[in-house]
Amino acid sequence: MTDLTSIRTTPMPEEMHLLLTDYPRDGWAAHPNFKRATEQWMGAHRMFRQLAEVTRTETEADLDKTRDPDDYAGRLSIYGNLLVRNLHGHHHWEDHSYFPELSAADPRFDAGLEILEKDHEALDGLLDGFTSASNRVIKLIQLDEAQARDQAGAIHEMAVNIETLLERHLADEEDLAVPIILHHKLRG
């Protein structure tokens, strides 16, 4: 399991926000260069935040014994899988398509990109541990509910860590990328 202390918990340095002063977050949606592709990218980020929250709250319901174990296993399987698969696919697309485009448009993106890439690596470790632990709990629910509930505590800790990392990382990613997109009229 990846320990949260090994993950960056502070916001990106202010100098990494590049054009954020000229393009503040509260004006993005109304900006003429804010196009559907950027809105969809940020929509994916909202979905990741929601899936992380659902995974955490479903695990809390299991730990509190307010969720039937079989129901929890089904929900963990569905929502955990959606979270992991979609995050991996999203990060692959960012690393191979989106980020190179931003870097080519504005080399100032590169300093922040290094930080974001380290976040992606840390998140990959969390997701791998989460997947293994979740698969174990889903199997244990059929064999030994008490042991499964004990193991669910580890899933809860990982879900909290994933949610914490995503909240900071996605906000930083948006604050870094969207002003560059707006400034250079990208993704239109």
Image: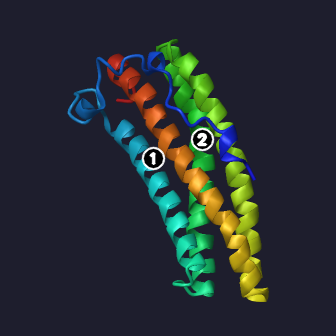
The circle on residue 102 is none
Residue 149, x across and y down, in percent: 69, 78
| Residue pointed to by mark 1 | 45
What's the residue type where badge 2 is placed? His
Q: Nearer the viewer, residue 107 or 156?
A: 156
Graded by Cα atoms within 10 Å as few (under 14), some (14 to 19) or many (20 or more), the crowding at tag 1 reads many
Q: Nearer the viewer, residue 114 or 183?
A: 114
Quadrant of the snapshot with the C terminus: top left
Q: In the visual, does 80 lie left or right of 150? A: left
| Residue pointed to by mark 2 | 91
Q: In the visual, does 141 lie left or right of 49? A: right
For image coordinates 23% across by 28% down, the residue present is 31
Where residue 67 sits, quadrant-wise, is bottom right
For image coordinates 76% across by 79% down, the residue present is 139
Up-down relation of residue 99 to residue 166 (above or below): above
For image coordinates 69% across by 39% down, the residue present is 6
Q: In the visual, does 162 lie left or right of 29? A: right
Up-down relation of residue 143 to residue 112 (above or below): below
State the SS at label 2.
helix
User: Quick check: can you spot residue 6?
Assistant: yes
State the SS at label 1.
helix
